[in-house]
Image (tube, grey):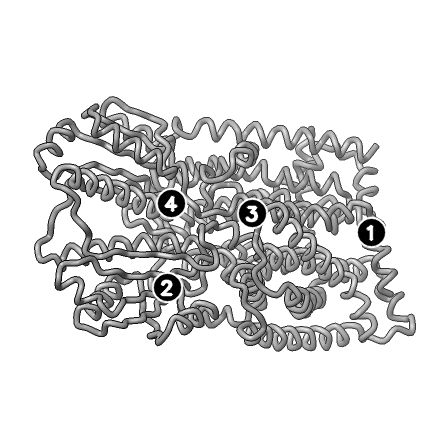
Amino acid sequence: MVLKEFIQIFRDRRMKAIVFFIPLLQLFGFGYAVTFDVNNVPTALCDLDRSADSRELARRLEASGYFSIRYRPGSPGEIRGLIDRGEALCALQIDRGFAKDILKGDPVAVQVIVDGTDSNTATVALNYASRIIAQYAKDKSAQMTGPRHDILDVRTRAWYNPELRSRNYNVPGVIAIVIMLTCLLLTSMAIVREREIGTMEQLMVTPLKPVELILGKTIPFALIGFFDMILVTVVAVLHFGIPINGPLWLLPIGTSIYLLSVLGIGLFISTISRTQQQALTATFFVYIPSVLLSGFMFPIENMPKVIQYATLANPLRYFLVIIRGIFLKGIGLDILWPQMAALLVIGIAVMTASSLRFRKRLS
Amino acid sequence: MSIVRIKAIVKKELIQIWRDPLSLSMAFLMPVMLLFIFGYAITLDVDRVKTVVRDLDKSSLSREFIAEVVSSGYFTVVGGAGSDRDIAAWLDDGRARVAITLPHDFSDRIRTGREASVQIIVDGSDSNTATIALGYMAVITGTFGQRTKGVRIRPLVEPRIRVWYNTELKSRNYIIPGLIAVIMAVIAALLTSLTFAREWDRGTMEQLIATPVRKQELIIGKMIPYFLIGFVDMVFSVLLAVYIFGVPLKGSVILLFLFSSLFLFGGLGVGMLISIATKSQLVASQISVVATFLPAFLLSGFMFSISNMPVALQVITRFIPARYFVAIMKGIFMKGSTFDLLVREGVFLMLFGLAIFALASKILAKRIG
């Protein structure tokens, strides 16, 4: 039965390519495109002072790597156009008399304008600009009045991901996303397809028991899910340089438990859909909220309380904690057991419910 | 090209759509669901970061410092840690994201005018939250340091900050206009990617070929009903965005729908093309996900700004219609952009739609043989 299913899936040679390339495309997409890191913000600098001091400030902005000064408008009026057209996201205006005021020790302002459309980039860019300007101010006053120490010496450290690379956070999570999309879509559509073509009746007259039928229908997709997990892990480590700080043996165990839920949901979709069109639409209806409300890209703590409780039923949520725990935090079963347990409970519940429905539909 | 024949195909397709109310209702529920999720459930705004405190000083000054951190609104203290190992436990199982340690001599040193140290550990695994939280922390410690000195010394150079367009820096205003573009891309693909593949799977394609219908007529006839559904979805999404989620719409509504039609034409075309080229629903569904949903979601700049991507990827985004449509939507919604600012994007969408249409009819001709 499993063999028949395999032959059927891969008879279409394009399926082989799909099982292989779709995970990779997703991995590269999420690995490279999904980044909230802010660097090289296209910046316009309107330097009306044209002094050594103003050039020094500009140099520091560029040297930080966060800003890249692409435009040097001669008048403040030109800033509007640059930001309107989206050519610059940030603009700095240094007024005439900047260096003179500094020399006199008079506080002087630097105008920072930011395009707020992308609120995340804007917030981060403003933070960086403020810090660079504050540091510059401190160094300037130190030059003139001698060094003055701060009252607070803040030492910050980032654990688990010291360079704060968003890739380290996103790439391991892709394992969960890939398995979900591939397995959900394949399971639900393949079963509905048999019904559409009418081969389901043929299978039902064979001496296969319903349980055997369900197993035969799901095991091949589980194996594909496993293959995708290994593929993504290998590329994540070798190509993206993602560290594995924790026990790797936990990953296949977590994956197996997670697959229970995913295949269960796929099976369920197949019982409510009559056509492949319905299966496709229904899969998207499950897949999109599962991904968005899993903590994959958007932290669960920032969601409203009601939604936070709703995410407790989302298997993806737990699997992501497990994956990131293994890759980044280097924690093991002693800390991850609640996630494992929750995943197992959801998996068994979903699988049982769908199997019962599936059997009812058969008879 | 004959209007009568196109009409006949439209009618046939409409009957088929009507017979599948489940798919039809999902086509209308999809925008509601996505807008709800992005409008209410998720946000990139970082606040109430879970913080654990290890206060070794236990003085009024150290408590004042913690109160300052909390009153900023960006951090919530969820507990106190007794030891460094305790801090590790809080961060390991994710109960806290930030740990603040104040040393024994915190208030002593400040009172005697010496530098006091504050140690801040942040869970870097979610790098975005970590970066923003550290930024806030730097501002808070900065002002605290100045205040405790007694006099507020103005720094020599001060940034005077102004935010344009989205003055409150609300991520919702930024995300929803772009999201409508993503919704349209997904709907267009879901609706059409199976239309031709279905006919082939069921063997009804031969029947269609046997009729005098020409291939362009077939494509246009199949496209019109889905175009209507897509357009209704579009109007619906814009209404929800403006009236339910209060996203300001600064530009012209007519312009908005004009460009949407162009995008829809191309988007439906891509779905048709996949459907014609693959001939199998199973394969078509997988390819449509990769060819439409993922690029629209990841590479359109709707959420992840294109300027932060590696250069190679930035080049690829230039060939993705959703990128232009997202720029149009954001421009019209947030900046009130006028036609002249969006011509380039509009021309691309138009050319893309025509090219896809030509390609689809060519492949259809070849497949029919």
Q: Residue at x 20, y 36 (%)?
A: A110
Q: Which residue is mark 2?
A: B98
* Residues packed near mark 4 inside 10 Å, few (<14), some (14 to 19) or many (20 plus): many
Q: Tally the marks.
A: 4
Q: Which-is-in-front pick, marks 3 and 2?
A: 2
Residue A248 at what x, y percent from top left?
64, 63
Q: Which-is-in-front pick, marks 4 and 3?
A: 3
* Residues packed near mark 2 inside 10 Å, few (<14), some (14 to 19) or many (20 plus): many
A93 sits left or right of B251 in the view: left
Q: CA distance from mark 4 to mark 2?
A: 22 Å
Placement of the N terminus of chain A among the 4 image quadrants: bottom right
Residue at mark 3: chain: A
Q: Is residue B205 visible?
A: yes
Q: Which residue is mark 1?
A: A10
Residue A306 at what x, y percent from top left?
43, 71
Q: CA distance from mark 1 to mark 2?
A: 49 Å
Q: Is residue B191 visible?
A: no
**Which label belongs to residue A121?**
4
Q: CA distance from mark 4 to mark 3?
A: 18 Å
Q: Regarding mark 4 in the picture, which secondary structure is present there?
A: helix
Q: Amino acid at mark 3?
A: Gly
Q: Which-is-in-front pick, marks 4 and 2?
A: 2
Residue at mark 2: chain: B
Q: Which-is-in-front pick, marks 4 and 1?
A: 4
Q: Nearer the viewer, residue A83 or A194?
A: A83
